[in-house]
Amino acid sequence: MPPEKLFTPGPTAVPWQVLETMSRPLIHHRTKEFREIHREAAENLKYVYRTSDPVVILTASGSGAMEAAVANLTRVGEKAIVIEVGKFSERWRELGEAYGLDLVVLKAEWGDPIDPDQVAKAFDENSGVGIVFVTHCETSTGVLQDVKTIARIAHEKGALIAVDGITSLCAQNVQTDDWGLDAVIGGSQKGFMTPPGLSFISLSENARERMEAGRHPVYYFDLIKAVKALEKNDTPYTPAHTVIIALNEALRMIKEEGLENVIRRHTRNAKATRAAVKALGLKLFSAMPCNATTAAVPPDGTADKIRNHMVERYGVRIAGGQGPVKGKIIRLGHLGYYHETDMYTMISALEGTLVDLGLSDTPGQGIEALLRSFAED
Amino acid sequence: MPPEKLFTPGPTAVPWQVLETMSRPLIHHRTKEFREIHREAAENLKYVYRTSDPVVILTASGSGAMEAAVANLTRVGEKAIVIEVGKFSERWRELGEAYGLDLVVLKAEWGDPIDPDQVAKAFDENSGVGIVFVTHCETSTGVLQDVKTIARIAHEKGALIAVDGITSLCAQNVQTDDWGLDAVIGGSQKGFMTPPGLSFISLSENARERMEAGRHPVYYFDLIKAVKALEKNDTPYTPAHTVIIALNEALRMIKEEGLENVIRRHTRNAKATRAAVKALGLKLFSAMPCNATTAAVPPDGTADKIRNHMVERYGVRIAGGQGPVKGKIIRLGHLGYYHETDMYTMISALEGTLVDLGLSDTPGQGIEALLRSFAED
């Protein structure tokens, strides 16, 4: 078997400079040394989030930070709009149900985004909505949501907006302050090029006021306590500090490359991948594709065969479909530390696989499309 | 400055074999390869827990698993006994308060355990107690609690018992099945010789029935979902799988050494440390010392000076006091991957510090006591 490399939309491949930090002897987390690392990491998260709001680091995966948002920013029976367009935005609905919210659920077919006009309509038809929960980039379908417009609509109606930015941060333009996003959630194992185990949540002044005014029972996910601890570069409970040390290294790399350049790299990789996928005769699944992952529809019944062959024969691990599109789509990842040459690796493995499985007899077309796309940009 | 080594009761020093796993390129967590690692780790956790109950691995620190116990095993208004003898057992009370339980709090002075007779008395005076929350080894004071007897009392009254074993697992005899412990919580950064980021919770059949019958709103800490996923060697949400890979390596080392030998190593190190501390003229703080950490009382006003000097001059980082004993005690850690020679490192640094600070003029007494203690055992 060839050595395996991840081309999945999370966990993503981690640069060796980040991996190396994880093999160092442990330091203690209640020290000046670690507090300085925590301070730097939290500061650089604000740089990626484009915010002056505090960004709390939680020892939990992204779903934990989503729960923190629901538990801290709502009360039992409160009205909330949930935008559900795939497996990960479904979690907002499940969380709202678990916490006894009065939900207005706006659904779209998997592969489609929600038209912001529908959100405006939902506000018109439902008074007293306190908060909107939305997923910026729906990982299960590769769909990007127009968060900027939805945020404007929510604010006009006096509601907060909480955004799952787990798959969009670093890959897309996320303007936390300029768009007025009240809470944005991130995860270490995505664009942040770090192993899983950490999630992040920014909190606007309005969000902080809201949680001070009343919320659900919380303890581990107590964001008031977490914000207070953050002011001292500390955490209420033992953090996964070796992962924070790794994150800090990854954030330094992002800062050195420059956020604009990082987003541009993602945009180029995504555009080239879409061109290659189309040149290979596959359909794009998403009506509004994001920069993190390209979902493609191969001939009926071949998706899992393609995926398995790619990893077994070429060592290129991509993702498949979930829920209603299980076995129907493949998802090619270009979120995180991926460069032009990595796209050649991924697309040549896909192209080789299509030829090996008798699904194509014109090798070279995917690579040609990649070359042309990168040359144009 | 000399290279720093941790002698703190968590995070503890991590063996290089475990650290090395963290620097490997990432694999994906939804693969046969990782499921096999997860299976082996969960199986070896059962070995350390001495249980046939499922032991769930959570991506959260120990306080997260404690919250999972409270949220899944109680209902609003339910009566519960909390045994509070220090900073970590205090968390059981805080959690009980956050979740609106009807608490019977049994307190002891910091440094003392609770007499099991008090627990029996509390049951006699309060009918309808559903669960007892207890900390096996209270890290903030080094006090060991008689969990076996308390479990017997709880079961006689038809109550469950949830045990914080974060600092006792691997260091003490923890008989989950034989003592009938309904939920036992562990943490990766303690006796398990792994970086922080993971916590564990075992669930007896009674505990599983109890949570099926009704509980608080849960999502990230949904233990019904977690147990179900565990049956397929899976997790409901993205786990910190690189830390699970590290944990698996640490558990292999524990299994190879043999749990009896691991506990015996802790017992010998703890006994020798106590002998050395006394020989150096310091008082033991704990009335019932555990095998994880030795809390000692140096002359008034010297605790933090000793601690700082030990790390700055000798690179030996120990812990100080918290809460009411802040600045009054030092805590010497021997939890995890520590051997006889490490105790010489730690005690010689303490002894050197006492001489350097003019608190002792008879060097050698601590080391002599260590030598004698190890020779006797």
Image: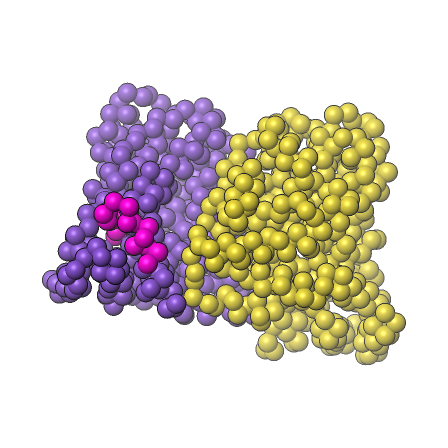
Chain colours: A purple, B yellow
Q: Residue at x 55, y 33 (%)?
A: A217
Looking at the image, the residue that sits furthest to the front is: A358
Give left or right: position of B243 versus B344: left
Q: Find out whether residue B74 is within the magenta segment.
A: no
Q: Position of residue B65 (x, y in %)?
A: 60, 45
In the image, residue B213 sits, relative to residue A360, either above or below, namely: above
User: Quick one: A195 or B56, which is closer to the camera?
Assistant: B56
| A243, A210: nearer the viewer | A243
Q: Residue at x 77, y 37 (%)?
A: B106
- State the residue in front, A336 or A202: A336
Depth check, front residue: A318 or B118: A318
Residue A171 at x, y = what percent?
Answer: 29, 54
Residue A134, image x and y in percent? Answer: 33, 38
Residue B266 in view (yes/no): no
A246 in relation to A130, above or below: below
Occupied quadrant, residue A117:
top left
> Left of B150 or right of it: where is B257?
left
Q: Is A301 covered by the magenta stretch?
A: yes
Q: Which residues are magenta?
A: A290-309
At x 50% / y 37%, what residue is drawn? B219
**Numbered-mark total:** 0
Q: Quadrant of residue B311?
A: bottom right
Please tell me which residue is depicted at 61% across the width and 28% down the height of the picture.
B213
Instruction: Give the quadrant of the C terminus of chain B.
Output: bottom right
Instruction: Give how far across and how far down residue B35 sits, in percent.
Output: 50, 54
The answer to whether any part of residue B42 appears in the image is yes
Quadrant (top left/top right/bottom left/bottom right) for the N terminus of chain B: bottom right
